[in-house]
Image (cartoon, rainbow, N blue to C red):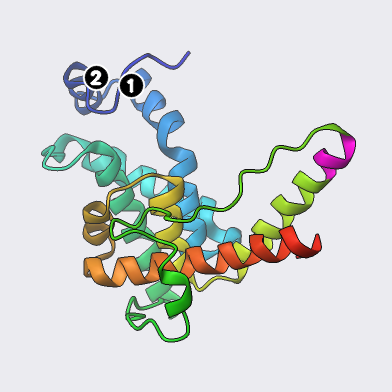
Amino acid sequence: MLLKKTTDDEAWLERLQAGDEAAFSDMVRMHHRRMLIVARSMVGEAIAEEVVQEAWVSVFNALPRFERRSSLKTWLMRIVVNEARMRLRHESRWVHFDDDDTGGFEGFLNRFASDGSWQAPPVVWTTHGPEGTLTGHELADCLDKTLDQLKQNQRMVLELRDVDGLEFSEICNLLNVSESNVRVLLHRARATVFTMIDHFEGTGEC
């Protein structure tokens, strides 16, 4: 059973760094899913699990040297990003984070505040009954397709920020890019998703 410990609990971290297997298993259960999301956004579905497994080996080997200068979550994400980068370099498919212009998306940027939060969020759907359930599944499928079509750098920033809840500073450190670049990538990804939701709401089609 997962222990009721936060990833910043000092005693728990000490157990981790001392090689406690139960603590390590707890950490895997807490963070594997989010690490897989990051890996998928960088290397795709086919090899994401392999990249995360390699990241866990690196984590296990590096834990005794973890200096706690950042949160454990940020440290883990940095390792999986580095593993994914190494794999992409090996396959010559690394996506550079140089998408720092806003051409074509000015009309959408006013939907977001300066901190990256929604000013005009998508409608919260409340559906009931079989028809509503079907609509919800269709929207989820459409969202998956939209995410798959995003540029890798945009999807990665979107998932790190909106799925995993990382701060802008953490994302900048993980990806080694400027905050302005991260914000533009996030705005573009959100704008694409928002456009899809608007279209779906109006037509019922993806």
Q: Is residue 64 visible?
A: yes
Looking at the magenta stretch, what is its main secondary structure? helix
Is residue 44 or residue 136 the one in the foreground? 136
What secondary structure is marked by label 2? helix
Q: Amino acid at mark 2?
A: Trp
Query: With respect to residue 42, does 38 lie above or below?
Result: above
Q: Which residue is mark 1?
A: 23
Query: With respect to residue 69, does 152 lie above or below?
Result: below
Q: Amino acid at mark 1?
A: Ala
Please name the residue shown 57% across and 63% down the image: 193
Percent coordinates x, y for residue 112 in the rendering: 39, 61
Q: Is residue 205 visible?
A: no
Please name the residue shown 48% across and 13% down the image: 1
Please state if 5 lies on the left or on the right of 13 as rendered: right
Please name the residue shown 31% across and 66% down the image: 182
Of callouts 2 and 1, which one flags the residue occurring earlier in the amino acid sequence?
2
Percent coordinates x, y for residue 34 in the rendering: 45, 44
Q: Which residue is mark 2?
A: 12
Magenta stretch bounds: 130-134
Check if residue 64 falls in the magenta segment. Answer: no
